[in-house]
Amino acid sequence: MQRLLHAIYWTLCRWLLALRYRVRVTGLDKLRSLKGPTLVMPNHPGYVDPAIVLAHVRLKQPLRPIVYEDTYRFPLFYPLMLLGRAFEVPNLSKASRQSRQQAIAMLDALAAALNRGESLLLYPSGRLTRTGTEVLGSARSAAELLQRCSRVNIVLVRTTGLWGSIFGCARTGNVPHLTKTLFAAAGWLLASLVFFLPRRRVEIEIEVLDRSRLPGTTREELNPFLEKWYNQRINAGAPSTNGIPEPVFVPYHFLFGPHKGHFLANTQGNDDGLQKIPAKTLAAVDDMVEVHLGRPLDPEEKTAATPLDDVGLDSLDRMQLSQEIEQRFGFSSDLVTETMGDLYRLAAGQAVAASTRPAKAGPQWTGRRRSAEPAQVRGETIAEAFVRRCLASPADVAVADPLAGVLTYRRMLVGASLMSRRFAKFEQNAVAILLPSSAAADLAFLALHLAGKLPVMLNWTTGAAALATALQTAQVRQVITSQKLIDRLGIDLPGAEMIFLEGLRKGMSKREQVAMLLATWLWPQKFLRELPRQQPHDPAAILFTSGSESAPKAVPLSHANLLSNVRGAIAAIGVTRGDAMLGFLPPFHSFGLTATLLAPVLAGFPIVHHPDPTDARGLAAALAAHRATVMPCTPTFLGYMLASGTREQFQSLRIVLSGAEKCPQAVFDRCQQLAPQAMLLEAYGITECSPMISGNRPGAIRAGSIGRPIDGYEILIVHPERMDRVAPGEAGMLLVRGPSVFHGYLNYDGPSPMVECEGKSWYRTGDLVAADVEGNLYFRGRLKRFLKAGGEMISLPALEEPFSKRYPPGENGPLVAVEGIELPEGRHIVLFTSVAITLRQANALLVEAGFRGVMRLDEVRALEKIPVLGTGKTDYVTLRKMVSP
């Protein structure tokens, strides 16, 4: 019955196609003697050729086509896909671990189908012909199937005459929009009164290929062979220009005479913008590509226009390489790269995410009530402050993001309360959160507090080793996260129970949601009565920081620490409830947690989240759409925004709060150009201090200063060794004390971060500062051996440790050492070594040790001997001078 349905269906297809295409098939008789599984492999000149091939190339058993999901799920085609039992191939235009696994699983399924005796229609190139000639490049599917299926029949199909059709790339140089093209074709069909549509001549040549004729079944051997066969007509003297077939124009109306039509040359990428990318970034990307290829790149391949297919990287290779570049350089994009230029731009943070859409604020955001009332926190614990804010301002806009839309405080209270019921059932008190800046992260954090749990904020950019250490240090088993994020990042947390927010939402019934919503109207005080029993000095969050050791240290911050810091920061910069904030700093940063989660939500001014701090264009668009007036940021991310945004997009800004690293003068200057009405306030903070310690005030900005201490802090500047006060204006080590300072690391047996001085206990920052007569602080350097880049702390001892283990000191002293400096244009970290090791090998060793993102080397410098002090210890002062320009 199924064969009869197929026969009737394809007979109708041939009749319909004959209205436009006059098809001549040669070699069809060769298929009659075929028995068993068959792999039919055509070239792919246009969207229409699969229908033409399936309608005219008939085997004794149904031929199952392999179709990409975008086409498979196209509403008009979907029923036909089901009827034809087509194989759906996942779309690999987005880089993710799940997509890669799906592609590998699909290859397994195709091989299994062939080995079961089925016949498949596979396009070896995996994409439309771009220039009229078939280019397989590094495509792997045909080679892998032939390797796994040794007894399959091989049928090659060459279709000619379609180059120039509206269903191909000849007319515009780009892949046609399928929906628009179908409507256009249908329109011309009707305009030509159906039966008078001019016909295009199409030839289909079939060859049954004996396996012995194959040069091999690796893609390096098979693909050039197939390319030569598909392009044989061109090589045999068919009309062409420089080896590219001339497109054939066939009019779409019987009254139009024949003419050549108009075609645009196919264009590739160019080198625009690459001149702005540092040479060491370009070299690093070239090096990573060479590692994948196992060969050096030719000079002509190191151009932006070079397709990665031509280099030898197929879709799975490109996906893996894109993810590795994201991990190394810290930038992300949804797109799998297609050219070398795409890789360069991704590494430099110039790639645009595929999911980026024009930012829209929505009527609820734009119509929100604005108030000049001072922003203030109402409560002594986070849960209390959150509930009191929700009850005081239930209809006010609280947060927004692209996924959740706009949430009022009432909706936040409902969502957090429903989540808290689930979290309260967890046995352990400490529960980890692994989420980007988002409404979901806000709700998860607040829901844990409503459940009486302790949030542990995980930093996924530090790599698998640091994440495992963090979980062990905090003794955490459950991790609240998103399936989409885990898939995107490719993170594995062995031994941890992943609590996916997508699953939590599905488990919340409409009845439960309505009941909770009614409670906010009818019994609002019950939310206060049901608050967990928390005290101000109980831990409220655990964050992690790397100092001079390789393992991250757990920093427990109390309710009093965090809320006092929020109050002090708000008072310092003068935020009101009429302000609106753009937040993109991740909540695993103390700056992100305090400034872009706790401050706006608890103090009562709205925030719009953007999950990707490297998406400069998206951030600038979100800023403009939501008319944000306040923006906490790091100089690195601010620099990206200023480089890609316009003056119009920055018009609403009133305050830019810059922290986490020193702000270069170039960023100040650019900000003044694009947002002259905004005040760029540079601030200073440390995770252990919740984090803000000092900052410039509106109307009292001091150039080069990190401002005055915020309310509640007492500071002391002392000589680093003698521990006595330094003279005014003299640089010394900064000591701080106050309600925002933590009380010690969690499960840490190292030296205490506190020191006794002048009869008081102080937190020893390890940073050198100087103070002027007005109390403004000026940062002078760091005593600890760490740098900062993109707001991330980079531990030089941590980077050195894997090399010290691999190359331990000998009788002549150390063999390796790592030193680095912070420059206006960025950090520069050097591995000094007396053993032979390349930069590629060195960074590979760091990846093997679990380091990711900013934790990498910029240079390897060979020395005959590592300089040492009289005690035998490495002389880092000398090495630092060697790094300095």
Image (cartoon, rainbow, N blue to C red):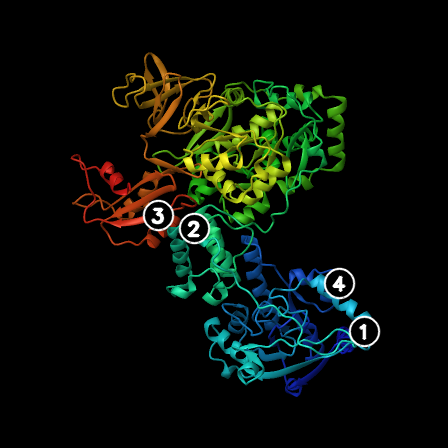
Crowding around mark 4 (Cα neighbors within 10 Å: few <14, some 14 to 19, many 20+) is few
In the rendered structure, which disc, 3 or 1, sits on the residue that comes first in sequence? 1
How far apart marks 2 and 4 lie (CA) works out to 45 Å
Residue 327 position within the rendered picture, expressed as x and y whole percent measured from the top left: 46, 48
Is 443 located above or below residue 72 in the figure? above
| The residue positioned farthest toward the top in the image shown | 759
- Could you tell whether 39 is left or right of 61 in the image? left
Amino acid type at circle 4 is Leu
Q: Which of marks 3 and 2 is in front?
A: 2
Quick one: quadrant of the C terminus? Answer: top left
Quick one: quadrant of the N terminus? Answer: bottom right
Q: Mark 3 points at which residue?
A: 858
Q: Are marks 2 and 1 in contact (CB under 8 Å)?
A: no
Amino acid type at circle 1 is Ser
Helix, strand or loop under label 2:
loop
Q: Mark 4 points at which residue?
A: 76
- Could you tell whether 176 is left or right of 883 in the image? right
Number of numbered markers = 4
User: Residue 277 shows which numbered tag?
Assistant: 2
Front-most of 438 and 449? 438
Residue 275 position within the rendered picture, expressed as x and y whole percent measured from the top left: 43, 53
Residue located 75% across and 64% down the image? 183
How far apart marks 2 and 1 lie (CA) works out to 53 Å
Residue 652 position within the rendered picture, expressed as x and y whole percent measured from the top left: 60, 33
Crowding around mark 2 (Cα neighbors within 10 Å: few <14, some 14 to 19, many 20+) is some
Residue 7 position within the rendered picture, expressed as x and y whole percent measured from the top left: 76, 77
Amino acid type at circle 3 is Asp
- Can residue 342 be seen here? yes
Helix, strand or loop under label 1:
loop
